[in-house]
Image: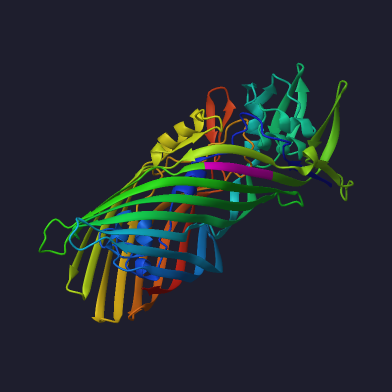
Amino acid sequence: MKKIIAVACALCFVAGANAQTIYDAAKLAERDLNGTARFVGMGGAMGALGGDISTMGTNPAGIGIYRSSDIMTSFSYSAYGTESKYLNNTFNIDKNQWAFDNIGFVFSSKIGNQTALRYVNFGFNYKRTKSFYKNMTMGGLLGSIDDIFVSQVNQMGQQATDAVWYNKNNYNFNGPDAYENTNIGWLGIIGYQGFLTNTMREEGYDIYEPIVPDEVDAYYNSNEKGGISQYDFNVAFNINDRVYLGLTIGAYDVNYKKTTLYDEDYGNGEVYELASFNRIKGSGVDVKFGAIFRPFESSPFRIGLAVHTPTFYNLTYENSASLTSDVYLKTVQDGNDEFKVRDDNPPEGSTTSRQFVDANNGRGIEQDFHLSTPWKFNVSLGYTVGSSLALGAEYEYEDYSAMKFSYPEGDEMIDQNSTIKNFMKGVHTFRIGAEYKVIPQFAFRLGYNYSSTAFKEDEAYKWIPTNSTLTDTDFANSQSQNNYTLGIGYRGKSFYADLAYQYSTYKEKFYPFYNDLETAPGVWETVTPQATKVTNTRSQVLFTVGMRF
């Protein structure tokens, strides 16, 4: 048995080696329901009610409600659960995490009682706006991913006849220099260097064929971590205690890491493992405008409006991969050429020494790019009954199909943006919340959120360009998400403390890979496995303490 390890990497950035996908864009555009425990306990439906530090990230005018200064901080404990079902196989993974969720302050400055401008307030808030923390596992009988290795090699200007492919360009897939060729994709290279592609020669051209059965026993595992930190700087105005205006400038810090392992077992001691390592890091900025109106002087009813510009990200994508292959090989002679091919009937007890291929000394690739997320539009309603009951409702809309990737020089990534437009759609979010004070010092809260999916049903998939450095072929089309919240709070003369619980759940259709194979000219065969049904849950307990003065 021969064991070969091929490490896919590249020395430096090369044009055309794009690794960005619609799933990266969606991750960076999505936001968690997070902030103070009061805000979360009311389901985040405080855009028109205001008076909470977290509202500067949804409706900046909410800070104009303040008539005293405020300082606070929040911590949380989260339990994450992932259940995946594929055929008759079920996998469960549970993880826990502590987090420092937010800290902020509001400085309230009274202008006067007789002037139209009553207050000018300034605020700052840090919060962890997105957590990427997630582990997932699935496995079972699949069509082999080896078909994708061959398919990517075959698309390098080749021609098919009777399901046999001819490399008309005679690209060299051997050695570290292959990873610097911007015409060759990494999946094709590491599949070739891992001897998962049978190679022969006919009429002066290389011929490529997959070496594995049509169906194999496969296993997949991924580990995601990191998050997006949000820093909001706010100014808000109170005009005649009836009109409130606000502006927030948001700064974002991105740190996302993902490690995946995919392996196949052919049932006779022959296996291989494909490991991928990805990271996205960088920063972004956006601007939020908000207003709250009290249309009737004698009524506490409020209407809130907010517009968020796209978040403009400057990002770096890092990725590398390794492939470990255990296949039985033999050397064949074709004229003056020698080829390594799989031996379907190896001699009993056959074994060879281990070989190691280290492309470009194991250095990964870094690719800089820009991303602009969708515009966001928010409409909210708020109503209070005396000082005992507060009710809030919100609707928010984002058109995910309008997101755009671009190169550092500013040129549009046409293929990626076309994929976004074709596979993504608008997201609708609804929030409702209520707070009831049993006595002036103690309050109970309830909330609910619903967000629709950003992916077009049964259409979206992970498109990997022929010359891409991407090696993680998996993707998941998330469906609608539901958040259920409740909370309690204490308010003293200056000190306050709040506790909230949030339960979030959403389902996904997961695929370890997607591929349409051209088995002969004009003849295509889909080898994508059926969807793995995944249920994701998160239980979060959030605690906030603060002081008003």
Q: Nearer the viewer, residue 384 or 425?
A: 384
Q: Nearer the viewer, residue 524 or 105?
A: 105
The answer to if 315 sits in the magenta stretch is yes
Residue 489 horizontal/vertical position (percent): 34, 77
In the shown orientation, is residue 155 left or right of residue 397?
Answer: right
Where is 413 relative to 376, above or below? above
Viewer can see residue 59: no
Q: Quadrant of the C terminus?
A: bottom left
Viewer can see residue 490: yes
Residue 268 horizontal/vertical position (percent): 75, 51
Magenta span: chief secondary structure: strand
Where is 78 relative to 246, above or below? below
Q: Nearer the viewer, residue 76 or 243?
A: 243
Picture quadrant where residue 61 is located = bottom left
In the shown orientation, is residue 291 left or right of residue 203?
Answer: left
Residue plotted at (11% across, 58% down): 296
The answer to if 433 sits in the magenta stretch is no
Residue 460 horizontal/vertical position (percent): 45, 41
Q: Which residues are magenta?
A: 314-320
Residue plotted at (30% across, 73% down): 445
Residue plotted at (35% across, 70% down): 38
Picture quadrant where residue 2 is located = top right
